[in-house]
Amino acid sequence: MAFKLPVLPYAFDALEPHIDARTMEIHYSRHHRAYADNFNAAIEKHPGLFEKSAEEIIADLDMVPEDIRMAVRNHGGGYLNHNFFWQVIGPDGGEPSGDLKKALSEAFGSFGEFKQQFEKAGLSRFGSGWVWLIAEGKLEIVTTANQDNPITEGKTPILTADVWEHAYYLKYQNKRADYLKAFWNVVNWKEVEKRFTESK
Ligand code: MN3
């Protein structure tokens, strides 16, 4: 039993013009696949771990044998983060509604203010990493380096943006700010709302 590369739930060009088809193709077919392959290769050394889910493993890295712990953190994290990322983005865009909209206003002042703070956090993450919206009673924004996932710290992410250069460089080059502004056009708020409801 290996960890499978999940099927991308839309076509490579579905997020155009905000995220271009070539970026999506390379990001999914090469980067995500490589994380999955390297994660599986690490777990092969301790195949008992195949009985756990990727979430269970990343949430409890201390139980991962030391000889593969760094590989699991990096590649298992990369595998899991992209599984999550493809779910919370999509072609529809729009805005949050209902309880999530209310919670965003309570935590950040308004939806607009939330977007600004999320973009700012993504911009200030030096080097490669991720920016996350966390549901922990009150909503909060955090960033992680490399392929770390907030579940390792016991947090529940409901939205993320990949701020590795491979996520935007072909179209936006060094302009991460422009990528993060465009990101709002491809957030799958229905999925984020579902995860928000499940977190309570
Ligand atoms: Mn990526």
Image: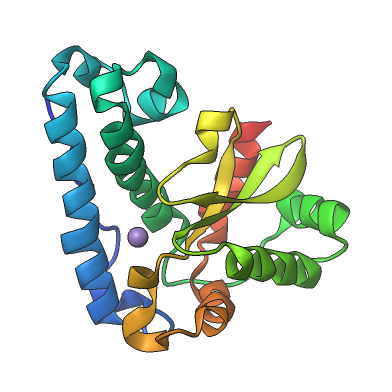
Estimate the x, y position of residue 199 in percent, counting from the top left. 63, 33
Instruction: Judge left or right: residue 16 versus residue 195.
Output: left
In the rendered image, the vertical position of residue 188 relative to residue 185, given as above or below: above
Name the quadrant containing residue 116.
bottom right
Residue at position x 23%, y 80% from top? 22
Q: Residue at x 54, y 64 (%)?
A: 126
Examine the rendered structure and indicate whether residue 109 appears above or below residue 178. above
The quarter holding residue 28 reads bottom left
> What percent of the width, then of the height, locates residue 185?
53, 77
Could one spot residue 7 in this view of the protein? no
| Nearer the observer, 164 or 54 | 164
Residue in the picture at 55% in, 75% down = 180
Quadrant (top left/top right/bottom left/bottom right) for the C terminus: top right
Residue 88: x %, y % from top left? 47, 56
Instruction: Write the residue at 61% across / 33% down.
Output: 155
Image quadrant in which the N terminus is located: top left
- Residue 100: percent from the left, percent from the top? 72, 51
Q: Quadrant of ligand 1?
A: bottom left
Numbered label tally: 0
Q: Is residue 130 visible?
A: yes
